Amino acid sequence: MYALPQIAKLLKLSLHDIPDVMIDTLLTDSRKLVHPDSSLFFALSGSRRDGHAFIPELYKKGVRYFVVSEPFSKKNFPKAVFLKVSNVLEALQTIAAYHRQQFQWEVIGVTGSNGKTIVKEWLYQLLQHHYNIVRSPKSYNSQIGVPLSVWQMEPHNNLAIFEAGISCRGEMERLYRIIRPTIGVLTNIGAAHSEGFESNAEKLEEKLELFKTAKIIIANADDRLIRDTIVKKQLPAFFWGKHRDSQLRIASIKNDKSDTTIRLRYEKQRFEITIPFTDNASIENALTACAVLLCLKIDIADIQSGMRHLQPVNMRLEFKKGINNCIIINDSYSADTDSLSIALDFLQQQSRGFNKTAILSDFLQTGKNVEEVYCTILSQIEKHKIKRLIGIGPQMQTWLPRLIGEKKSSLTDFSTYASTKEFLRHIHTLHFKDEAILVKGARIFEFEEIVAQLEQKLHQTILEINLNAIAHNFRIYQEILKPTTKMMVMVKAFAYGSGGTEIASLLQYHKADYLGVAYADEGVELRKAGITLPIMVLNPEESAFDSITEYNLEPDIFSFTMLEAFERHVQKIGVKNYPIHIEVETGMNRLGFDTADVPLLAQRLKNNPYLHIQSVFSHLAASEDKVEDAFTLQQYEKLMTASETIKEWVGYSFLRHIANSSAIARFPKLQLDMVRLGIGLYGIGDKRIRKKLQPALTLRSTIAQVKQLKKGDTVSYNRRGVIKKDTVIATVRIGYADGYYRRLGNGVGYMLVKNKKAPVVGTVCMDMVMIDITHIKGVKEGDDVIVFGNGLPLEELAERMDTIPYEIMTGISQRVKRVYWSE
Ligand SMILES: *Cc1c(COP(=O)(O)O)cnc(C)c1O
């Protein structure tokens, strides 16, 4: 916490009349606002978003203190204080760097191409009983994330672990000034984030910048480039590896089914560690962590026991449909105050106006004052307007009633239980209904059981939707747009099968400009879920006009009949200037006004008091097809001519749009004032952009039974699958009623079991399908099967059955459970 005048002084501003208020939050993202009174907003400008644009909205919500690089007039913001600097990001970094200098204890800086977050989290797991640690939340490792991480350092801490990530030259110097690590940890140098560098050597040089004043640098001696560079530069190294110069030397590594035992030598002592992982990345990360612990002089016995109990770093927040229309956010892996605020933010984002409930276990945070921990929890719960709180565990039982009583908390609906078992005995009396519920607890409380009870029971085929990938893809498309081009996202057909309200909430959070749906009902659903973005309805029917105007939806008007009917409706309900969209037919021959009718249409809309044209648009017939590029451009020209005519008649301007996902990537010229993104959001796109996108969907199922068949046996209806040699088949819980098409039967389709291909045998049944797993060892009933997703792209499946990904995505039936997750 700093006083505002002190911050101004740090930024070398000589302003008078700065109020003496305390600032505890450096706010860089307007969506994350929780306490306006003590937040200082930094108006950062990215390639697309200019933070200055959010100032009016934040001011309205009570924020008063702003760091800006553009002049602002106090006239519109009488109570605001503007700290004007030449570079807002530098200002943020300067404050963080100063804050860092106030602490003398050890600061561990972790960098490298892969494994940064895991090493950071494992160090936290291993050291939490020895130190009071502050660490980067999630993977806050960027030019903005690092200052925000460092800002969390407080006097009661005595060790910091911060991540640093860079993507081009020159960035590490800035991060160095903010973190100034005393202990450097280099995980590895690999291919990740290579675009901004000429070679690995150059990347390594840049990374080592972080450690220029570190007392010791921990690194892998078996990577020649790393070893040679560190030795040549005469940096103080602590190497681990098989190489003979390693201080921590590997004698042997032995894998068994689920563990790895590593025999080690360190200063003449021999010892071994066992970790509950077998993959190479985990072994490397564990050795890196082991070296750090030795540098910190942790007892070998403690290291051994810590290593045995390492837990996977699961930063997923799962989002599921619950019983009685509830929404469940599953975070049953961790309980600490940092991750609580992340989880509460996510709850906020997905709560759709429902009442919010939090079920929390004891927070077993060692090294912190217990009372303080529970005060923090309670204040976060209040700030996020949680309606009911359920605490589970002896500490919750002690502290919640006491603190709520003492503080006269606004929270009135709370209850506590001594244990998870005790809570489960009462769960049916608590009547969860229409609530957004966060379930968050330390592992030992086994909150999985609570999640299982609250979850809607559907069958075991699930469509997983990675919300991070969707947000990422949204950003990638935004980046290729001109800064002034708006983004409409088409969320018709349940957002291409992914769940209309869930995807729309995410897009609203990430500030899409417009949404598009096919039918009015879909728009009504979104409004009921709390979506306030403007929504265009492609196919309004007369019977839906009432809901269109009642829910403030904007119809696509594509014929004179519809124009007249809608105008009459608007007149009848007594509204003026109702927003409409005009679709022009340019070659798709689906919907739209013929270009020959455009002048007549324009005259009808001139001086029309009831209707206001929000946009004029058209739809491309073959934007992905190179052979048809001339036709595509011709469609564009027709739209331009039509919109020119309309504009001349009506005398005002409106948005013009024509580009869908593939046109955005292929024709920059077609971006106009707005684009309409669809399938690209899910990571499916033109090859120019495909590599940058992340596939967002995984369809998975499970094996119901495994059978051994002999030559001559047959499989499925009409005995279509004939077995030619001894074969093992597995029956999978998915069929054509789930959207696994019959066309994929008889060897056309395949699934992945243990990452290996298993072809479909025989015809696809309504609820099940059989696959050949003869060549895959150790498959059991209940095992996971990937129908599409990582390793089996949706595009490939579509190609095999001679269709397009759109058909498969929108054909996944409603009985398939959708599970959302976010990191
Ligand atoms: C569905 C749709 C889109 C989006 O198309 P994608 O190919 O999925 O990007 C755009 N515009 C209209 C009118 C649509 O119906």
Image (cartoon, helix red, strand yellow):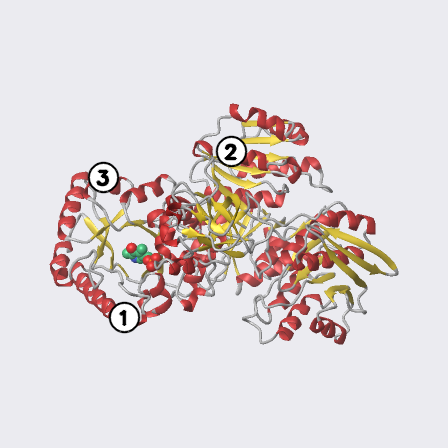
Of residues 448 and 674, the one nearer the viewer is 448
Q: Which residue is mark 2?
A: 454
Q: Earlier in the sequence, mark 2 or mark 1?
A: 2
Question: Looking at the image, can residue 547 be seen?
Answer: yes
Q: Earlier in the sequence, mark 2 or mark 3?
A: 2
What's the amino acid at mark 1? Glu
Q: Which residue is mark 3?
A: 546
For marks 2 and 1, give the CA distance. 52 Å
Of residues 357 and 62, the one nearer the viewer is 357
Q: Which residue is mark 1?
A: 628
Within 10 angstroms of label 2, few (less than 14), some, or many (20 or more) residues? many
Residue 760 on image: x %, y %:
44, 53
Question: Looking at the image, can residue 405 be seen?
Answer: no
Mark 3 vs mark 1, foreground winner is 1
For marks 3 and 1, give the CA distance. 40 Å
Q: Are marks 3 and 1 in contact (CB under 8 Å)?
A: no
Residue 356 on image: x %, y %:
49, 35
Q: Which residue, as the protein is rendered here, is positioned at the far front?
A: 712
Within 10 angstroms of label 3, few (less than 14), some, or many (20 or more) residues? some
What's the amino acid at mark 2? Leu
Residue 489 bears which disc, if any? none
Residue 511 on image: x %, y %:
41, 53
Residue 583 on image: x %, y %:
22, 57
Residue at disc 2, secondary structure: helix
Depicted 465 relative to depicted 114: above or below: above
